[in-house]
Structures are given as structure tokens and as C-alpha cells.
Amino acid sequence: MLEPGEYEERVVADGADAVTALPDGTGLLLLDTVVAKQLADEGFARDLVRVVRQARKAAGFDVGEPASLMVELDGEHLARMRAHRDLVLAETSVERLEFGPVPDGFAGRIGDGAAVRVGLTKVGSAT
């Protein structure tokens, strides 16, 4: 058995911010900083919801006013977004969601900084 002074206490972790000793010295707090893909993809979709809400506000839509939404994303991010299509529809008062080019839409950044452009059309409107 080692006696005090015969050893050195060190905290070793994958990341400097991942672990810390509790103030009273009774243990360690270890954080799992790896984000699961499913959780990351849901966060990505929630970022899109935020951009759509900003676009609705900028376009003067009333709260809850139904709309059609066109989303322009690159291929890698498009696949991630399709998996959470229902979440985007439910959270944005959008009746129709399509993916494709949006030349004059509202620009934003989502997830890891991916560029997105959204276009909104009021339901029943020709423009």
C-alpha cells in the first residue's frame, strides 16, 4: 500500500474540459463530450427551424400562418435533414416542405456552419 507522499495524484482525460475533481475531493466529474450522430442530426434540424422562424418574421408572416417551404442545402447536409422532415414541419407551421434551389431566399447557417437558404410562400398565394 502506498502512503501519502509516495504517489502523485493526476487527472488524465481525453480532453482538458472533460473531467474535473469535485471541490470536496470526494470524486471526479467526467463529461462525455462525444455527441451521438442522431442527436447531432436533430440539433441540425432544430437549427433549420430557427432559420425558418427568422425568415417568417423577416417576410412578415403572422404567427402560425401556413406556408410552403423550399430549403436549399448541399448534398451531405440534405440527407441529414430529410431524416427530420416531420420535426421541421411540426415546428414551423409549414404545410409543404421541398428541397431544391432557392435563388432569392433567406440565408442562414446551421449545424457546423453549413450554409442554408430558405424560401417561404404563403399557402394559397401565387408568390
Image (cartoon, rainbow, N blue to C red):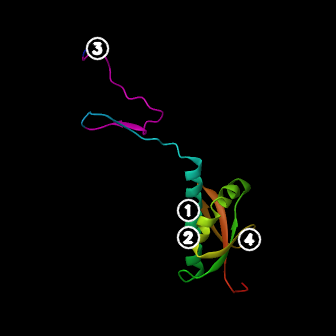
Q: Residue at x 64, y 79 (%)?
A: 67
Query: Regarding mark 4 in the picture, which secondary structure is present there?
Result: loop
Direction from residue 115 to residue 26 in the image, left or right: left
Q: Which residue is drawn at 70% across and 56% down?
A: 79
Kindly report which numbered mark, 1 or 4, lies closer to the viewer in this rendering.
1
Query: Regarding mark 1 in the picture, which secondary structure is present there?
Result: helix
Q: Which of marks 4 and 2 is nearer the N terminus?
A: 2
Mark 2 — residue? 91
Direction from residue 33 to residue 22 in the image, left or right: left
Q: Which residue is drawn at 70% across and 86% down?
A: 125
Query: Regarding mark 2 in the picture, which secondary structure is present there?
Result: helix
Mark 4 — residue? 103
User: Marks 1 and 4: CB-CB under 8 Å?
Assistant: no
Q: Residue 6: name its quadrant.
A: top left
User: Marks 4 and 3: CB-CB under 8 Å?
Assistant: no
Image quadrant for the N terminus? Answer: top left
Which label number is shown at residue 46?
Answer: 1
Q: What residue type is labelled 2?
A: Glu
Q: Which of marks 4 and 3 is nearer the N terminus?
A: 3
Between the residue at mark 4 and the residue at mark 3, the CA separation in whole angstroms equals 70 Å
Q: Badge 3: how crowded within 10 Å, few (<14), some, or many (20+)? A: few
Between the residue at mark 4 and the residue at mark 2, the CA separation in whole angstroms equals 24 Å
Mark 3 — residue? 2
